[in-house]
Image (cartoon, rainbow, N blue to C red):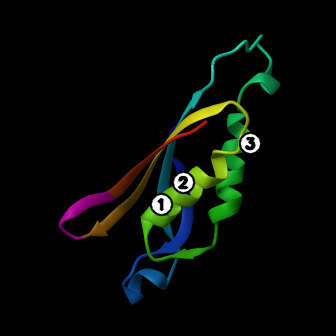
C-alpha cells in the first residue's frame, strides 16, 4: 500500500511533541494462497486496513517510530489470510542533515 499519511506527535525531543507532524506508513501484505474467486471476503479489504491504521494512530503521541511500526503489525496480523506483513514508517524532516528517517519491520506468521 502506498504510504498512508498520518498526523501525530512523534519524537523524543520536547519540540517534536509540540504539534502533530506528518508520518508516512507503507504496508506490504502477503496473503495465504487462494482460492480468491474474485470475492473481497476471500482477501484483505485494503480500504479497511487504511482506515484502521488512520483511526488507531491519528492524534496520538509517540516517542519512537519503531512503536508505530510494531503496533501496525500487531493490528494487522489478525486479519484473515495474512501470512506476512512488511511495514515501513517514515518521519520526514526528522533531522536537519537528512531528508527523512525510517524504520522497517517484518512479520511472518502462521
Q: Residues within 10 Å of mark 2 (few under 14, many from 20)?
A: some
Left or right: residue 69 versus residue 34 is left
- Give the spatial CA distance, label 1 vs label 3: 19 Å
* Sooner in the amino-acid sequence: mark 2 or mark 3: 2
The reply to whether the C-beta atoms of the residues labelled 2 and 1 are less than 8 Å apart is yes
Left or right: residue 40 versus residue 85 is right
Q: Residues within 10 Å of mark 1 (few under 14, many from 20)?
A: many
Q: Position of residue 99 (x, y in %)?
A: 26, 58
Nearer to the camera, 53 or 74: 74
Quadrant of the drawing holding the C terminus: top right
Q: Position of residue 101 (x, y in %)?
A: 31, 59
Query: On the image, numbered disc 2 is attached to which residue?
Result: 5
Label 1 sits on a secondary structure element that is strand
Q: Position of residue 22 (x, y in %)?
A: 48, 63
Stretch in magenta: 96-101
Residue 66 colored magenta? no
Q: Which mark is residue 48?
A: 3
Nearer to the camera, 7 or 87: 87
Compared to 58, does 85 lie above or below?
Answer: above
Compared to 61, does 85 lie above or below?
Answer: above
Query: On the image, numbered disc 1 is attached to which residue?
Result: 23
Amino acid at each position: 500500500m502506498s504510504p498512508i499519511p498520518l498526523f501525530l506527535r512523534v519524537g523524543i525531543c520536547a519540540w517534536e511533541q509540540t504539534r502533530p507532524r506528518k508520518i508516512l506508513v507503507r504496508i506490504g501484505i502477503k496473503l495465504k494462497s487462494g482460492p480468491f474467486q474474485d470475492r473481497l471476503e476471500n482477501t484483505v479489504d485494503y480500504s479497511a486496513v487504511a482506515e484502521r491504521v488512520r483511526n488507531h494512530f491519528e492524534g496520538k503521541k509517540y516517542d519512537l517510530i519503531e512503536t508505530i511500526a510494531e503496533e501496525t503489525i500487531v493490528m494487522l496480523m489478525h486479519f484473515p489470510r495474512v501470512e506476512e506483513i512488511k511495514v515501513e514508517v517514515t518521519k520526514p524532516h526528522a533531522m536537519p542533515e537528512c531528508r527523512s528517517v525510517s524504520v522497517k519491520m517484518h512479520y511472518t506468521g502462521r
